[in-house]
Image (tube, rainbow, N blue to C red):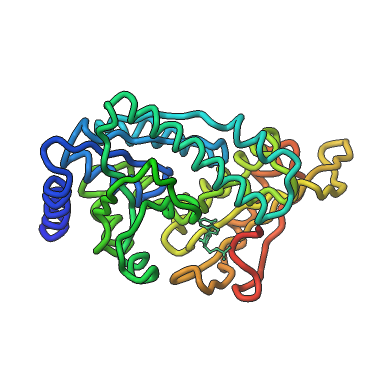
Amino acid sequence: TWTMLNIVEDAVEAVRKQIGPEGRAICALSGGVDSAVAAAIVQRAIGDRLTCVFVDHGLLRKGEAEQVERDFVAATGVNLRVVDASDQFLKALEGVTEPEEKRKIIGREFIRVFEDEQRAILAGADGAVDFLVQGTLYPDVVESGGGTGTANIKSHHNVGGLPDDLAFELVEPLRTLFKDEVRRAGEELGLPAAMVWRQPFPGPGLGIRIIGAVTRERLEILREADAIAREELSRAGLDRDIWQCPVVLLADVRSVGVQGDGRTYGHPVVLRPVTSEDAMTADWARVPYDVLSRISTRITNEVREINRVVLDVTSKPPGTIEWE
Ligand code: XMP
């Protein structure tokens, strides 16, 4: 729309002014809409003087890394460095089952990898990178008291700050916008629809949807099951009705099943479709039985290790949306 075009143009102009004709900036992409739209705006403002970093922690869902590496780059022409850090994350997570411990490890490793990248970029640019782009939204600004402060990788993992030797001035082009405005800005900027309309997905990713220790094999199982659930929910036209639908792998649980002539002893996955306004409270979504049935049939047919699909019918409170 005309107004959205103006909001985008104003944001681009403001960034151009803040960064100046020589300034350089970096931005961490998470796969989510906020960092993508923020980066796209800054790219319009300063072009190749922006370098984006995508840390692939190996905990994303099927197709999401490609959306960033291929589709987002194609749509924006952004200068992107991809770091495949999945080995490092999996190693750090080895044997860890406690949810908060998982979150801490993932946040810590993310900062480590991102800092290494920053140092490499700084070295290549003779230290002339002064700006860090963040996809902070208006509700985040209000929640944190409104001040601009030191850099904080909040958008990705809600943890930590940066050490003093990596001090940047923050560029926050979405500071005055609400989520729906960010999505419309993303459309205006021509970003991939799957990114613009992505439902909430936690920074620690599938790492907190495997109940039990995280392994490459378990991630692969969950990724397949999750992709089927998302595909069927989309096909049924339920994307806008449902806030999100975590698929959770009960990796340490096994149950007996039967398939063809044979007994199976596989894992269950939990479907957790919810409706919500703001994620503070939620209700379990009344997904039509035929859609649930298709998801269940497909997952148990197509994912060999899964022989049971169960539905979570708990509201929040008392249950949180995620299982960890
Ligand atoms: P819960 O499980 O607390 O989730 O009801 C509320 C919303 O927040 C998302 N979530 C996270 N997002 N980092 C994030 O960026 C996290 O560590 C995290 N944990 C939960 C969750 O998907 C839901 O939308």
Residue 20 visible to an observer of this rendering? yes
Residue 237 sits above or below residue 133 on the image? below
* Quadrant of the frame with the N terminus: bottom left
Q: Is residue 269 left or right of residue 262?
A: left
Q: Residue furthest front?
A: 165
* Quadrant of the frame with the C terminus: bottom right
Tell me which corner region of the image, top left, top right, bottom left or bottom right, holds residue 282.
bottom right
Tell me which corner region of the image, top left, top right, bottom left or bottom right, holds residue 291.
bottom right
The residue positioned 33% from the left and 52% from the top of the image is: 135
The residue positioned 51% from the left and 29% from the top of the image is: 84
User: How many dots with numbers?
Assistant: 0
Residue 283 sits above or below residue 79 on the image? below
Percent across and percent down for residue 218 are: 70, 38
Residue 134 sits above or below residue 285 on the image? above
Percent across and percent down for residue 272 are: 61, 60
**Residue closest to the eye, 177 or 183:** 177
Percent across and percent down for residue 314 are: 66, 71
The residue positioned 75% from the left and 48% from the top of the image is: 212
Q: Is residue 58 left or right of residue 65?
A: right
Percent across and percent down for residue 136 are: 34, 57
Q: Is residue 43 left or right of residue 259?
A: left
**Residue closest to the eye, 30 or 244:** 30
Residue 294 visible to an observer of this rendering? no
**Residue closest to the eye, 57 or 88:** 88
